[in-house]
Image: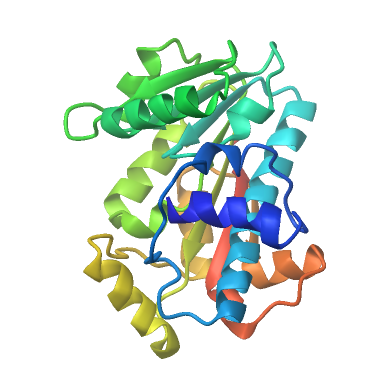
Amino acid sequence: MAVAHARADHQIVDGARVFADPLAVRIVEGDDRGANDFQEGLDDDAVRHRRLLIAARSRFADEAVAAAIDRGVDQVVVLGAGLDTAAYRNTRADIRFFEVDHPVTQEWKRQRLARTGIEVPASLTFAPVDFEQSTLADGLAAVGFDRGRGVIFVWLGVVVYLTRQSIEDTLRYIAEQDGPVEVVFDYRYPVAAPDRQRVDRVAAVGEPWLSFFDEDEMRSLLQSLGYERIRDLSAARILDDYGIASRPTDSVVHLVHAGAR
């Protein structure tokens, strides 16, 4: 929810300076936000900068998806979709979206979509997956995902919460598709002392950060799994490219756009 609210706030407070999402505000309508754990203890300037980081991440992913579609990709898989709105903003009949999430989370989102009047397009397929009982491969196969057609996977805000084995298994599955395949995801560098307070804060609310990589480690992992085209940029570089002044701490967050064939 914190990320969804940050995207919504970016539309209102920042005037969608980095990323325009006409559904971001609507999808969080009616929430009683109270004290947001995501923002607690941060000054206003820090909160604003975090919003811009989240907006930049969303824009980077949207641009990667648009570029993939231009190359002929016609399937988009959003892993850990949460309240992501990409499938509801891109409703071309010839581009098929799949949203993967836990069944409970997905049902909660569907109720929210109905309550806020956001139409579910015919081009979107929900893929509920309980990873304690099933696999990503089985979950997608069950709803008609075609491994032989071009696809881009979008996997934002998830990697840091997973074990290294889970990360490797997911990236391997993605790379082993039968058709052209791409993936967009983010990761974090090993925690530096100034960031320890935030690490402790997210752990205290039951969402500990588990996995960190440096750029060489991530590139080595991707290459070992068969990824050939790897674009790995720090959030600082991306913010600068979007005309936003970055901070030294932004360099610990990286975004990757990689292709396996």
Residue 96: quarter of image: top right
Residue 42 horizontal side relative to residue 54, left or right = left
- Which residue corresponds to the image point at 60% horizontal and 27% vertical from the top-left? 87
Q: Nearer the viewer, residue 196 or 36?
A: 36
Q: Residue at x 46, y 26 (%)?
A: 115
Q: Is residue 36 above or below residue 178?
A: below
The answer to whether residue 75 is left or right of residue 34 is right
x then y, percent, for residue 70: 79, 28
**Left or right position of 129 against 257:** left
Q: Residue at x 34, y 31 (%)?
A: 108
> Is 118 situated left or right of 247 in this image?
left
Q: Residue furthest left?
A: 133
* Number of numbered discs overlaid on the protein picture: 0
Q: Residue at x 74, y 34 (%)?
A: 66
Image x and y of residue 126, in percent: 43, 20
On screen, residue 206 above or below 74? below
Can the viewer see residue 217 in this picture? yes
Image quadrant for the C terminus?
top right
Q: Is residue 190 above or below residue 223?
A: below
